[in-house]
Structures are given as structure tokens and as C-alpha cells.
Image (cartoon, coloured by chain):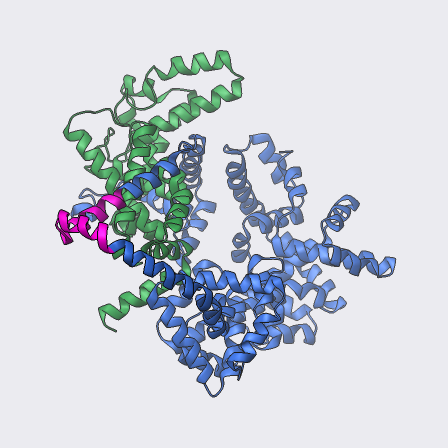
Amino acid sequence: MSDEEAKLKLAKKYELLDPDVRLMLQVKAGDAGAFEALVEKYQARLVGILRHMVSNKEQAEDLAQDVFLRVYRARERYVPMARFSTWLFTITHNVASSALLKRSRRKEVNLTNSPSGSMPTRPLDTMAKEKSSLMPTRQADRDELSSIMRQAIDQLGDRQRMALLLSRFEGMSYQEIADTMELSPQAVKSLLSRARLKLKTIVEPYVNSGILPEQLANSGLESKGDSTGESSKGSESND
Amino acid sequence: MTDQNKQPDRERTPLEADAEQLTAYLDGELSGEELAAVEQRLIDDEAFRSLMQKLQSSWDMLDSLPRTGSRDAFVRTTMEMVAQAADADNETKRQQWLPNWLGMLLGLAVIPAVLAWASYWMTLQQIKAPRKELIGNLPLIENYDRYMRVDLDIEFLENLDEADLFTSEVISLFPPVENSADSNLDADVGPLPTQEVRDQRADRLRSMPPRQLESIKRNKAALDSLSGSRRKELVDFQQKLMQHPKRDRINQTLVAYYDWLKSLGQSERTELLDTPDIPSRIKLIAAKIKQQDLKAFGREGATKLPAADAEALFAWYDALIKQKEKKIRRAAAVVYINTYKEKRGENPPASELESFRRKPLRQLVGFIFKYDRKTINPLIQDQDISRLKNLLSSEANSILDAGFSAAERTRLIINWIDAANQSRSSISQEKLRSFYNGLSDRQRDKLDNLSPADWRNDLIRMYRKRQLDINADFDEERTIFGGS
């Protein structure tokens, strides 16, 4: 079978299997309604993923719009070579990586990896105390846990975080994540394993004795239990 | 590709190696021997099990992250942005083609004339074309849904027809799900019309009931929205099928194959499409049909066994679980801890775990079946099956020996055990009443025409069958976890 035939067969397979591929092919044929349907279907998921990659919701929405614009501009040369979602998240990954790179070059380290970036503009424990005095305990606990998890994933490297988000919130298989991030499945397995270990290391002191990640970082204890081989703040050395 | 795929140079620590194995396990990425090895180690090695629980627990805590939605106007602003970009792109293209002054001249002089002519021509076509096209493509439009979901390959369908896999017995075991949108649509789509001339098609179209006509229009709109090449592919296939000497048989096979595909999950359908050559694909289809057959037989197995054999099965089962009590209690505790964490996001309190461990054995087995059925498999060994065969009648033995492999036989027996377990647990009146209220009108009418004794027997049979099919009893779940 020639490459061209193999490509056609693959394209047909995805057209048969994936309704979103069929929508994208309608976009290619000039159907703006089909594009709107795709935007409606994926907007929340895209903004959700990007929100965990960059510093604020507005920036996440801007990047999501950039992703959709790229999808639209690519419509004429679109040939389905994967599920639509895989293709979309590949573009998302590229857009997010490029935004993070630009930011780090400009040294506007206002990204999620910054200790004072993203969520915590005030110390976490202060926030938690304030909340617990205003709301029912359960709500305060949930908010505190949410903040801790937010801080925890912020401490992952960019690729670990993206792999984690795709696995946990998009339910992608290793192969799909590998296709999306242009990695091998083994590399994805390794990324996710280190991400899980890192998360465990960060949240374990909180679960066991209520120590917040920030307190842990200040005490310098973090490295003792962290054998993931990756330093925090987005280091990609072992990512 | 850059160095992204490069593995870290340093060696992994034992903790990292364990974490990698457990991560793949928790993500459902292990299979076969690896899966069995991890599961066995989870049973044997407490530290390994503890690491898994911690990894899973921190992973589950991610659920506490708020779900970020986008603002209400996101779709509208995105569409506006895209429309602006499209205008800008068109403008760029136009400027590349024509100098500005020429473009303006054309805009002023030629385009209105062209528009006027085009408008007249389109109106004329709009009156004539749709109906003409609808009649011409009627068989294709009627079968649109099927053609979009099966391989449009006459040779494959010929081979499939010769393999004679879709006998009525198999199909009747897996009727398409009623009330699904697909099935409703299918009910309106007729088989391939044979030897039909254009006038006959037009007559048929005219006499169609409104609901069917609606579905035809929907299919036509979908067909119109396809790319040119895909549409051509469908038209070519339709023509080949119409000219085929065995077209009715081939069409019946196509319809049966399409119905059968609905019983498969997405990954199974992908597996079929990924199987390159026709003989291998047909072999795979045959294997899947056999698997389904076995499963359905297993579901019915306990009730089909002669009474004496059912008794023998229960006796064997009671002896088996007593003999393997230690293993069963250990496996049930692992399943309990994992399920508890999955549902509650935390470890069960020690007192609750202890109380769970003391529950009757049969209840623990039922619990494993409900929450992690595969844990049962390693508990049934060859000598256990031999003992069972010695107890069963020759009739029941002939069922077990009917061409099943060892693994298939084990699965069948496990299904029997499940049925035995289910059939001996009591059903409360409340459960039965609630189940009866949940039946469709048609099912209730059918039951209400029976004598009181048959009414109850049939209702219990349906209840059991539903339990085995969906394996989800929420009342019992609430009891086990002490309320929601």
C-alpha cells in the first residue's frame, strides 16, 4: 500500500469513527455552523486546560481563541490523521508552549509556576483562615484543598502538567497523549509517573498533618521526600 | 523530533520504578501478564499497595480543582474573530488577484449583472433540483446511516456473506437497543429497493408517512454536507451494490453487520477498522460474535441448568468459597479499600474495614463481582473445574465441553457463580416494586396478563436478568457505604 493510500485509509477511518472529524470536514467544505458547533463543544475543555497552564482566565481564553483561529485557518488543508480532539489538543499544546516560552523570555514570570503567581496573591493559610471564618467548614476545606492542588500542579513541569491534564481531565490514553504532545508512549508513562509521585510528595504532608505546601517549601523539607528527579518551578530537565 | 523522547540518563530508583508500574496500572494501561503481576503484588505486598493508595489518593484530589468555564460570550466573540480573520484572508486573496482599481470596476459593473443572472438560475434550479436529486439518490439517502458506518467495500461484504456469521440466532441475542435515536431512525429506513424505476421511486416518496419523510430529508441534508470525494464514494458504492448479481443477499449482510456493529464499543470498532486484510477482519468478527454468544449464554446459564445441576453448582460453590476463604477475604478487602477511596476520596476507617472483613463470605464474593469482577479469575483453578465437572450431569458437562477453550470455560463458570450468587440473595418487596415501576408500559402490560404466580416469577426473572446485565444495584451500594 502506498503512503497516499495509507493516508486516505486513515482519513476515512477517522471520518467513520469520529463525529467531530465529520464536523471539521464540513467546516472545510465551508459550513460555518459546523465550526460554531465545534467551538461550543470544546471551548470549556480548552479554557479549562489552558487555565492550568497560564496565569489567569483571561489569558487562557485568549489562547483558546487563538487555538480556534488556527483550527479555522487550517481548514482548507485539513486531512483527518487522528481523532479531532487529539489534533485540537496538539494545537493547544503548541500554543500553550509557545506562550509559556515567550513569557519566560520576557521574564514576565507571572505564570503559574511563580510562587506568588496565579491563585495565591495572599498566603494560602491566611486565605483558608478567612474562608473558614466566613463559610461552613466543608466549603473552607474544599477551597483549601482546591488551592493546595492548584499549587501542587503549578509545581509540575510544563510537560508533566500538560500530560496530567490530558490524562486526568480529557481521559486520554498514553498513545493519545503521545500523539498530542509528540512524545513516545513510554515518555508519557514516565512523565505521568513522575507527576503522580510529585503530587503525592506535595500533598502527603497536608493529608497526614495539615502542613500546607507553602509552609513545606519554606521549611525546606520538600526535597527530602521528593524523589521524582524533577525540581519544581517548571524545570524541564527531567520532564 | 527533539530530545523530548529521551529518557533520563540516571537510573530509576526502586520507588520510581514501582510508581511507574502503578501509574500504568491505575491508568488502565497494563494488560496480560503485567496486569496479573501487579495485581498479585498488590495482594501480597503491603508497601506496594500503600504506595498505590497514596498515588491514587493524590490523583483523586485533583477533582477538587474548580472546573473553569469560559465567559458566556466566548463562542460569539470567537465566531466574530474568526469571521474577521476570514474576511481579512479573503481580502488578501482578492488583492493578490486584482489591482484595486480593476476590482472596483468589476464590482461596479460586472458583478451586479452576474448576481442577477445567478439569482435567476438558482431560483430555477431550486424549484427543479432538490426533488429530482432526492428521487435519483433515494436508495442512497435511505441507507445513508448504514453506509456512513460500515466499510464500503463490496469484496469485504461478499466475504462476510460467505462466512455466514450473522445467523438469526446470533442477531436475536443482541437486538439493537430499543428507543435509541439510531434505532428509531433505522425503523424508518427501508431495505435496499430492488429493480425500482424512477417513477416508482417518485411514487414511493409521495406515499411516505411524514416521519419517514422527515428522516429522508435529514439524511439528504447530511449527504449534501459531505465533501465531494466522500459523496462520490457513497454514490459509487451504491451503484456497485445495485449492479451486483447477489445484491439482496449482500445488502442483508450489510444491514446485519451494521446492526451488529452497534453492539460493539468504540475501541472494538477501531480494532476492526485497524485490521488490514479481509480474512483477518472476518476472523476477528467471528471471534467477537463467539465472545458475545458465550457471554449471553453465561448470563442465562444458571437458569438454563437443570434443577439438579443448579443444586450441584451451589454445593460446589459453597465448598469452593469455604476452601478459599482466606484469599477471598483478602481480595475483597483490597477491592473494598479501592472502591471506598474511589467513591469517598479517602481510606475507609479501620473500624469499617474490620466490620467489612467480617461479613459473610457469599456477600464478599458478591461485592467483588460488583466492583472488580476480574479479581475472581485467579481464584478458580483447573482442579476446581474438574471437581465441578464430576458433580454435574452429563447434559451440563456437554454444555461445558461444547467447543470452549479453557479460558472461556472458566469465564462461563464464573458467570454461573455470579448467577448462583445473585439467585440466592433475597429481593425485598420494595426493590421489586420499584423495579416494576421502572418498567416500560409494554413490559408491564405483558406481565399484568399473567397469573399472580407467573407474574411474580417473571418479574423476579427480569429483575435478576437486569442485575446481571447492568450489574448496578444502588440500594445495596448505599447499604455498604452507609448512605450517600
Vertical placement of B39 versus B191: above or below?
A: above
Vertical placement of B331 versus B60: above or below?
A: below
Q: Relative to B134, is B395 on the left or the right?
A: right
Q: Position of residue B74 (x, y in %)?
A: 38, 35
Q: Position of residue B370 (x, y in %)?
A: 59, 49
Q: Is residue B89 magenta?
A: yes
Vertical placement of B423 versus A138: above or below?
A: below
Q: Relative to B343, is B321 on the left or the right?
A: right
Vertical placement of A82 versus B273: above or below?
A: above
Q: What span is in magenta? A: B85-110
Q: Is residue B280 visible?
A: no
Instruction: Point out the image quarter for the C terminus of chain A.
Output: top left
Q: Is residue B407 visible?
A: yes
Name the tint of chain B in the rendering.
blue
Instruction: Point out the image quarter for the N terminus of chain A.
Output: bottom left
Q: Nearer the viewer, residue B292 or B91?
A: B91
Q: Relative to A208, is A216 on the left or the right?
A: left
Q: Nearer the viewer, residue B76 or B431?
A: B76
Q: Could you say which chain is coloured green in the image?
A: A
Q: Position of residue A151 (x, y in %)?
A: 34, 26
Q: Main secondary structure of the magenta part?
A: helix
Q: Nearer the viewer, residue A194 or B149?
A: B149
Q: Position of residue B343 (x, y in %)?
A: 54, 37
Q: Is residue B310 magenta?
A: no
Q: Quadrant of residue A223?
A: top left
Q: Tally the numbered discs.
A: 0
The extreme bottom residue here reads B245
Q: Relative to B7, is B328 on the left or the right?
A: right
Residue at the (33%, 57%) spot, across then down = B116
Q: Quadrant of residue A105?
A: top left
